[in-house]
Image: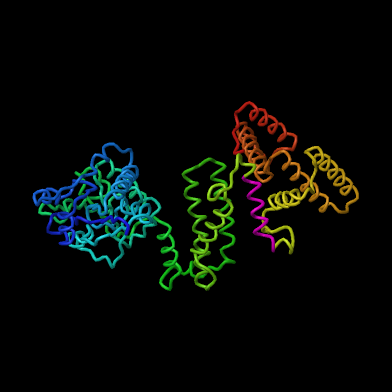
Amino acid sequence: MRNTLHVLGLGPAGLETMTLGTYRLILSSDKVFMRTNNHPCVQDLILEGARFESFDSYYDQGQSFEEVYERIVKRLEEELTVHEEVVYAVPGHPAVAERSVQLLVDKLSSRFRIVIHPSVSFLDGIFTAIPMDPIQGLLIRNYDALRGSELTGREWLIIPQVYSSLIASDVKLDLMEVYPDEAPVMIVQALGTQEQIVRKVSLYELDHQQFDHLTTVLVPPHRDVISMAKLEEVMKTLRSPGGCPWDREQTHETLKPYLIEESYEVLEAIEHQDMYNLAEELGDLLLQVVFHAQVAYEAGEFEFADVLRGIIHKMIHRHPHVFGEVHVDNSEQVLKNWEEIKKEEKREERAKGWFHFPQALPALMLAAKTQKTVAKVGFDWDDYRGALAKVHEEIQELQEAIKSGEGIREEFGDTLFALVNLARFLKLDPEDTLRGAVHKFQARFEKMAEMALGEEKSLENMTLEEMDFYWEKAKRDEKSGNIVGNV
């Protein structure tokens, strides 16, 4: 028979909250270990004649809690190799917010028999200390696991073991990303003892309080949280019978112009390096994603979770060098693997054609993606010289078309297509490059008009030669650094 590790919970307070079975086992066992002596019942147990060893010294020596818990597991493993029964006692309930017990089960259960004994948890004390009903929703998070918890504001949030002002400060900063600064927060200390204290403060005041190892922080439900779940809830409300008439009328088709418009406003914020505006525009773009997902959900097509599921699975599958065993040395190998995985994913579609990307892309982007696709199978020039020669060839054909008056539209399109191909060899984005040229032209024209106005002249009343004078003057100022365009 395998040696046995008994994992006990000391309860949240003194001996009166400890189970009779735990009390007897501690007093009758020869090998008893306490995770910490910082518990209300420890001194009472000593007076009752209990003999045990504490792991408190491990906390003084360890660089992190994980390191401390790893050492505890290693020590208990050593004890189990020479003793048939070992007792390990932790505060509260051993299966509630107790990382060391999780590690014990994961690492030792294959070799030893581990028995977890039930006990009163700190949650039992919370339910009596605070007027709350867990049926409203309950979320327990360690102080270092608050980020990314997808808080909805409908649940009670419980954060145990906030034992210092430094930890409380981290908790406050994390919570302030989700909750309003003035959100009410409850601080519970010495839970279940005669010294129990419950204080209610605003979130921004949290780290100005007193803390110890018996401190728990609670955040009641709050309607003004910031999260993806909240955004979905807002959109559902807008689309509901009592919501906004305009939002309720929208379809995938009617929303198309707004999706395009918001995308370009994001690009504009990036070009202007306006990070404040970029945050706002990304929010507007995200709203369009949630809007389309809600419309689809109402039609029984898919829901927002499907959108998340699809992109999460895709990103994990296409990054085996991060989430798998594939090794890469540089970004070029990453792109090569990416394309190979995409080919595998699109194998069935490949039989139907080569160009599996939106044909409604802006023309320059459509041309660039088309050229990249055919280049992957070798249908390409050896270097930029071939692409440049093709540009000259297309310009010559355009000139001939203009002279004859036939095929001008087609030859002009061929010229643009050849220029896009040359941009690819020069590692330029044709869309961004043209946009920069347009912005430079706009800045130069504005300067030209400003110069003319300074001499009390109006562009509308000037000849082309006169305007060209100011154009060249503005161009000289530009080269000297007096004009800064959004290039």
- Report the front residue among 281 and 93: 93
Residue 254, relative to residue 122: is it above or below? below
The image position of residue 165, as x and y in percent, is: 25, 42
- The way the protein has been coloured in the rendering is rainbow
Residue 332, relative to residue 1: is it above or below? above
Residue 353, relative to residue 273: is it above or below? below
The image position of residue 246, as x and y in percent, is: 49, 67
Q: Is residue 46 magenta?
A: no
- Report the front residue among 243 and 28: 28
Residue at the image point whose x is 63% and y is 50% from the top: 338
Say left or right for 283 vs 195.
Answer: right
Q: Quadrant of the N terminus?
A: bottom left
Q: Quadrant of the C terminus?
A: top right
Say left or right for 71 vs 460.
Answer: left
Q: Is residue 346 magenta?
A: yes
The magenta segment: 334-348
> What secondary structure prevails in the magenta region?
helix
Residue at the image point whose x is 35% and y is 53% from the top: 108
Q: Residue furthest right?
A: 404
- Report the front residue among 145 and 10: 10
Residue at the image point whose x is 52% and y is 73% from the top: 300
The image position of residue 390, as x and y in percent, is: 83, 43
Say left or right for 156 vs 373.
Answer: left
Residue at the image point whose x is 74% and y is 61% from the top: 353
- Report the front residue among 348 and 456: 348
Q: Residue furthest top?
A: 480
What is the count of numbered marks? Answer: 0
Say left or right for 120 vs 282.
Answer: left
Residue 47, relative to residue 305: is it above or below? above
Q: Quadrant of residue 478?
A: top right
The image position of residue 377, as x and y in percent, is: 76, 50
